[in-house]
Structures are given as C-alpha cells and as structure tokens.
C-alpha cells in the first residue's frame, strides 16, 4: 500500500505538492482552545488556500464546538457542516455551565456521495489507546469520511496519531500525512505501517496497489511505495 509520511510543519511541506494532485484533504488541525501546548491557534488563511489548491475535491476539516463561528473568518466560507456527536464520551469541555458534546466538521467543495446519509455522525470515541493523543478520532468515523469523499488519495496535513492514514489504507487509498511533533509522528508511523502490513497480508497480490499508472498524477511523484521520511526535530510551532 502506498503512503508517504513527513515529520515537519505542514506549512513548509504543502507548497511542494502539485496543484490538483490529491483527491481530498481530511484533517483535524489545532482547535485554538488550549487543550495542549500545540493548540494555540486555528490554522491561518494560507493553510486553507493551499488545501484548495492541492485538492481536486472536498476539504474536510474538524474543529471545536466553542470555535465554530471562527470558520466564518475563512475565505471562502465552508459550504456545509457535518457534526460529530458521539453517543458517549468521557471528555467534557464546558462553557457557561453547558458541556459540549459535538465537533463541527467544515466542508469545502462538497460533491454528491452515497456513504453519509445524515449530517450528524454518532461514532463513539475510542478510549484507552496506547498513544494517548488528547484529540484522537475513532477509525470508524474516519473510514466514513475517507469513503465518502475520496476515490484514490487522501492528504492529512495535521496527521497527529495517524488515524486518517489508518482508515485510508484500510480502504485502499494512497495517503500522505504530515505531522510536526516527533513523538506523534513516531506513533502515526507505527500505526500506519501496521495497517499497510495487514492490507498486504490479506489482499490478493493481483489486487494490491501498484504505482505504475492510474488516473492520478500524484501516483509516481508523491507516493513512493511504503516509504517514510526520517523523523527530525522541527522548529517550535503551536501547530500539531
């Protein structure tokens, strides 16, 4: 299975990706609510500009309930909002005595799909994970988003613990992930390698992904088979 992982600030890496070379971008950036030292601000306008340049299709962007109005500051504004409201969660973030139990998911360039029927998704959170990322998302949720909005390739500029990559490989998509934290990059690298290995073991050899053709111009230039860039210590940044 083809993937590429980069341990760097995504704002350094995104300008190197050719325009229109990725199906979709699915990402969970910092929320700007201070849940960790990397969560100082939401990404700048430049980030959205790069996403719209790189992706042929939909941009899928998780946010925090308390910051949902901040999406109106971006140009263009999101076309639609999905809501992730898990049936059960132990994490309680509250304001004015009310606890938030949802995450907005902003969408740009929405195309018709037949995977997600309702705009409220209720996949349960996954607790007790060994990587202990405070903002990790359930694989089931990411599989729905990957399945609904991509055909060949997925980019996650804020890869975190790698759940988007795991879902992408499980569904046979090519994947690029970028993560600034060396610690979480190592977690994502391990999880994604395991997902790729499982796909290799259980997929007939004549159905595996080969990088000798295909519709996407990204095939050969962006997705060297099962390769990762070595982790390095990036400059300090509030982004994860």
Image (cartoon, rainbow, N blue to C red):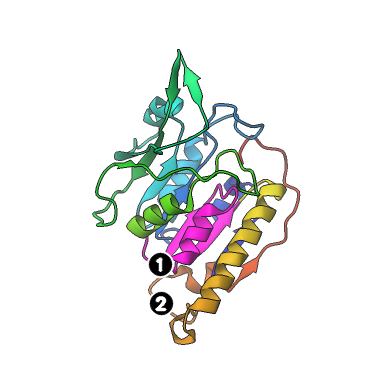
Q: Residue at x 46, y 59 (%)?
A: 154
Query: Between tags 2 and 1, which lies in front?
Result: 1
Q: Is residue 17 in view from this perspective?
A: no
Q: Nearer the viewer, residue 160 or 238?
A: 160
Rendered residue at 47%/59% (across/down): 167
Considering only order in the chain, which callout, 1 or 2, is on the residue closer to the N terminus?
A: 1
Q: Is residue 19 above or below residue 83?
A: below
Mark 1, other Cα within 10 Å: few <14 / some 14–19 / many ≥20? many
Considering only vertical position in the picture, is 125 above or below 116? above
Evaluate whether residue 142 shows in this view: yes
**Quarter the C terminus occupies:** top right
Q: Are marks 2 and 1 in contact (CB under 8 Å)?
A: yes
- Image spot of residue 62 (x, y percent): 44, 40
Q: Secondary structure at mark 2?
A: loop
Q: Find out whether residue 224 is within the magenta segment.
A: no
Residue 173 on the magenta span: yes
Q: Disc 2 marks which residue?
A: 214
Is 143 on the left or on the right of 2, as rendered?
left
At 53% from the left edge and 53% from the top edge, which residue is drawn?
Answer: 163
> In the rendering, at what x and y percent does residue 143 appear?
42, 56
Instruction: Look at mark 1 in the image and give the residue it sits on.
Output: 152
Judge from the rendering whether residue 40 lies leftward or rightward of residue 142; answer left or right: right
Magenta highlight range: 150-178
Q: Nearer the viewer, residue 113 or 49?
A: 113
- Distance from the alpha carbon under mark 2 to that under mark 1: 9 Å
């Amino acid at each position: 299975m083809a993937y590429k992982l980069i341990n760097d600030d995504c704002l350094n890496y995104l300008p190197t990706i050719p325009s229109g070379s990725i199906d979709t971008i699915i990402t969970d950036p910092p929320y700007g609510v201070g849940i960790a030292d990397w969560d100082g601000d939401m990404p700048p306008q430049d980030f959205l500009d790069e996403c719209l340049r790189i992706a042929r299709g939909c941009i899928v962007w998780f946010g925090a309930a308390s910051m949902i109005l901040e999406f109106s500051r971006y140009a263009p504004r999101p076309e639609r909002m999905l809501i992730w409201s898990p049936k059960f969660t132990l994490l309680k973030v509250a304001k004015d005595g009310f606890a938030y139990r949802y995450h907005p998911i902003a969408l740009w360039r929405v195309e018709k799909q037949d995977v997600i029927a309702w705009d409220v998704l209720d996949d349960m959170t996954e607790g007790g994970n060994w990587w202990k990322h405070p903002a990790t998302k359930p694989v089931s949720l990411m599989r729905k988003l990957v399945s609904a909005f991509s055909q060949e390739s997925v980019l996650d500029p804020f890869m975190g613990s790698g759940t988007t990559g795991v879902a992408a490989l499980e569904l046979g998509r090519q994947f690029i992930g970028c993560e600034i934290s060396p610690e979480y990059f190592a977690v994502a690298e391990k999880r994604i390698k395991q997902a790729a290995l499982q796909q290799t073991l259980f997929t007939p050899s004549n159905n595996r992904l080969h990088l000798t053709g295909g519709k996407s111009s990204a095939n050969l230039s962006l997705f060297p088979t099962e390769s990762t860039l070595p982790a390095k210590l990036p400059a300090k940044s509030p982004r994860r």
